[in-house]
Each structure stands twice: as C-alpha cells, then as structure tokens.
Amino acid sequence: MPESFRVRPAVQSDGAFLGDMVVEAANWRADGVRPRHEVLTSPEHSRYIAGWMRPGDAGFVALDGNGGPIGAAWYRLLPRTAPGFGYVGTGVPELIIGVRPVWRAHGVGRTLLQRLVDHARENGYGRLSLSVERGNFATTLYRSEGFAVVQPGVGRDTMVKRLR
C-alpha cells in the first residue's frame, strides 16, 4: 500500500503536472489508453489547462512522502462560448481531478475533492460541476461527496454539488 500523502495549493508551475492529470482522467479505463499528445492537443481537454493559472483558477496537488506529485484537483471558469464537458452555466466552476493509478482508492481523490469543495465555498461559489464518463468508478466518490447528476449525456453525465 502506498505511504501517506500531503496536500498543498496548486501554483502556476504545476501546469505541466495538471496536464499529466488530464491525461490520467481521460485514460481512466485500463483498456482505453489515449496517447498523451492526443489528449493534450485536443481542444476539449486542453481548455482545462491552457494558460494555467488564470484568474479564477484554483486547485490542490497531492504529494507522496518524497514530495512527488501524485494527484490534483482543480477548477476553472469556462465561458459559454468554449464550455467544458461539465459546463452548467456562467460563474459555476468546473472541477477536474486526476490521480496516478497506483494511488487510486487510497483516499487521495477524496481528500483533494474535499479541499477543493471547501475552497470553492470559501470563495463564494454556490455550485461546482464536473463531467464523468459512464462506468467510471469515480462516480461513486462524487455521489458520496454530494454531487448529483443534473444532465445525463451520451456516455457521460454532468454532476453538480450545491455548496450553500
């Protein structure tokens, strides 16, 4: 079992690692691996990291016992003209989360998610949204943390958590 981990706020220099976590999130299925360059150059994925850290961006990074990054959760406000997979409206940040496979099911994702939800609430947001592909085991985590499906989609669902 992996050793313990700690969490710190994300900073501008974490952009490359957040890219790694977008790739992990996109490749959650063991049998469906999309090449890194394909994920990072596609507009539907690159919008989550392009220009990190913009005003309104916030996130947290989990580190292993040696200080190496193992997971991240962040949110970003995306415009109606270039929405993300989980877009529900102007002023509702969309959450992205990724955890290295060896660290999954060890509380890293839950800890990151809880920190990000608390941060969003403290910063006055009323809701957080996300998108999850059907069959992704992370759906169980999201439901247990109060997210509910608001927009069923083709192969994926948009979930929202009310913060107040």
Image (spheres, helix red, strand yellow):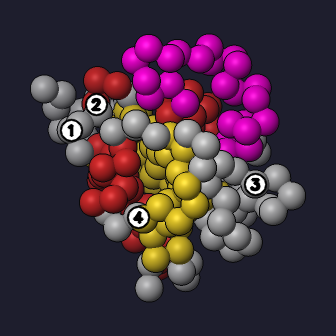
Q: Tell me the number on the disc at residue 83.
A: 3
Query: Residue 114: within the magenta?
Result: no
Sequence-earlier tag: 2 or 4: 2
**According to the image, label 2 marks what residue?**
103
Asked if marks 2 and 1 touch (Cβ < 8 Å), the reply is yes
**According to the image, label 4 marks what residue?**
147
Name the secondary structure under disc 2: helix
Instruction: Please determine whether, in this image, residue 42 is positioned above or below residue 80.
Output: above
Name the secondary structure under disc 4: loop
Residue 32: x and y in percent read 50, 17
154 left or right of 128? right
Q: Give, as a three-letter code, the residue at label 4.
A: Phe
Mark 3 and mark 1: span between their CA atoms?
Answer: 31 Å
Sequence-earlier tag: 4 or 3: 3
In the image, the segment drawn in magenta is 26-49
Q: Tell me the number on the disc at residue 45.
A: none
**According to the image, label 1 marks what residue?**
106
Mark nearer the viewer, 2 or 4 = 4
Mark 1 and mark 4: span between their CA atoms?
Answer: 20 Å
Q: Can see residue 119? A: no
Residue under the image location 61 percent in, 55 percent down: 86
